[in-house]
């Protein structure tokens, strides 16, 4: 049915818009008012990523940043674009956290 594809596209668009709106509302609080996280954190900064927070801002919330890597290539879909590089970063992040 041709109409069902259009209906699905429109309802998907509406759902994505609601989810994005909710996420933006939750993250609209200033960084200073967010809870601090003491969980070990690793971050890969891809050059074509949509949002690249400065480390100084991330450190206000994430107090235990173990790795902060500026990658050579990739963007928002890094897991598909730079699979090997991202997998290597994940391995390197978790290697020192392993319990021997």
Image (cartoon, rainbow, N blue to C red):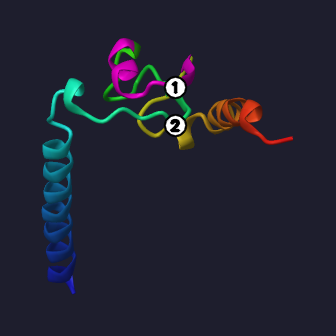
Asked if labels 1 and 2 touch by Cβ distance under 8 angstroms, the answer is yes
Residue 77 location (% of width, % of height): 46, 40
Image: magenta residue range: 56-70
Callout 1: 10 Å neighbours few (<14), some, many (20+)? some
- Measuring 67% from the left and 31% from the top, which residue is drawn there? 93
Q: Quadrant of the C terminus?
A: top right
Total count of labels: 2
The residue that mark 2 highlights is 39
Q: Is residue 58 magenta?
A: yes
Q: Closest to the observer: 52 or 4?
A: 52
- Measuring 35% from the left and 27% from the top, which residue is drawn there? 61
Q: Is residue 26 above or below residue 17?
A: above
- Measuring 63% from the left and 39% from the top, which residue is drawn there? 83
The residue that mark 1 highlights is 64
- Measuring 36% from the left and 32% from the top, which residue is drawn there? 36
For residue 47, which numbered disc appears in the image? none
Distance between the alpha carbons at the discs numbered 2 and 1 = 6 Å
User: Viewed as shown, does residue 49 lie left or right of 64?
Assistant: left
Residue 29 location (% of width, % of height): 15, 34
Callout 2: 10 Å neighbours few (<14), some, many (20+)? few
Q: Closest to the observer: 77 or 61?
A: 61
Q: Residue furthest right?
A: 100
Q: Quadrant of the N terminus?
A: bottom left
């Amino acid at each position: 049915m041709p109409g069902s594809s259009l209906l699905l596209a429109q309802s998907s668009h509406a759902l994505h818009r609601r989810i994005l709106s909710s996420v933006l509302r939750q993250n609209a609080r200033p960084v200073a008012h967010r809870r601090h996280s003491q969980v070990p954190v690793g971050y890969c900064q891809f050059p074509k990523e949509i949002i690249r927070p400065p480390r100084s801002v991330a450190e206000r919330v994430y107090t235990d940043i173990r790795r902060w890597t500026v990658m050579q290539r990739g963007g928002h879909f890094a897991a598909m674009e730079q699979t090997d590089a991202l997998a290597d970063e994940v391995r390197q992040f978790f290697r020192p956290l392993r319990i021997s």
